[in-house]
Amino acid sequence: MEILIQIGLFLLLFTAGWWFGRQAEQRHWAQLLQDEARLANIRISSERFIHPEANGQLVCASVVIAQDYFKLVWANIHNLLGGNLTTYETLLDRARREAIVRLKAKAAAQGASQILGVRLEMSDIGAEQGMVEVLAYGTMIFAPAQPNVWPPQPLDAIGATT
Amino acid sequence: MLLSNLEHLPNHRIIQQLDVVYGSTVRSKHVGKDIFASLKNIVGGELTAYTELLEESRQEALDRMIAKARQLGANAVVGIRFSTSSIAQGAAELFVYGTAVIAEPLQAMQSHNPPPLPHQG
């Protein structure tokens, strides 16, 4: 009897994870596309040696994101067989893009138009449960605002000197 | 305090390099938040409580670093790096470090041309 309850609970969590997790992921992707297009005027670069002619300040943004139960179980099964763990790839992709979007939003809110020296760092806070934190940081530059065009233009097209 | 994670401070000249300064916080997770997080783990998605917790702690580490830089008489910190390490089950150390410097603003340059380098001509 007990084992039946355990199997029932597992199946319930498994389906709930699959259904809600999939919805949440699709909503997140749609939101990300929107935000990325909205913030396209904030140029970012991981270059550290650009010398802009405007003042700058440190800016950082982070996000903690968790995997759903279905994907967690699936990843564990997949782990035995080896190969690309696609379920984790999408989790990390979402986390990094979200962190970048937040970084850009913070810079935009303070009137900056470029972010230089962008670094992405992932920290493991309970990775065994499929939970990751991504931190994005860089130096925002208070240069004149750029036109909002998609895809983003290279930095040297907007007057930054190296 | 001016902060930058580049090798230099935008639109400033570094006059004097002082010392490496750092700040850290060790933060453990909140029991209530932990229970909520494990529920959220079933459906996936962002754990807002954790995001806020880590952001607060990181800000505190930054503040501690800034306090140290101030003691040295610096007005800027350059080359800032963040690092996170989990030191025990449910506890994380948030560490930030950089070089404290004294910098002065460059004269506002109106042209987009870079200034001529001294060794040229």
Image (cartoon, coloured by chain):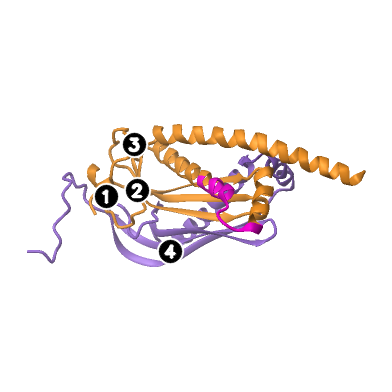
**Residue B63 x, y percent position in the rendering:** 51, 53
What chain does mark 4 sit on?
Answer: B
Instruction: Write down the residue under mark 4.
Output: B72
Q: Which of the numbered marks, if any, corresponds to residue A41?
A: 3
What chain does mark 1 sit on?
Answer: A
User: Residue at image x 27%, y 53%?
Assistant: A51
| Magenta-colored stretch includes residue A89 | yes
Q: Point out the stretch of residues depicted in magenta.
A: A80-93
Spatial CA span between label 4 and label 2: 22 Å
**Type of amino acid under label 3:** Asn
- Identify the image quadrant of the C terminus of chain B: bottom left
Whichever of callouts 2 and 3 sits on the residue coming sooner in the sequence is 3
Disc 1 is placed on an element classified as: loop
**Marks 4/2 same chain:** no
Q: Which-is-in-front pick, marks 2 and 3?
A: 3
Instruction: Write down the residue under mark 2.
Output: A56
The chain coloured orange carries which letter?
Answer: A
The chain coloured purple carries which letter?
Answer: B
| Magenta-colored stretch includes residue B69 | no
Secondary structure predominantly adopted by residues drawn in magenta: helix
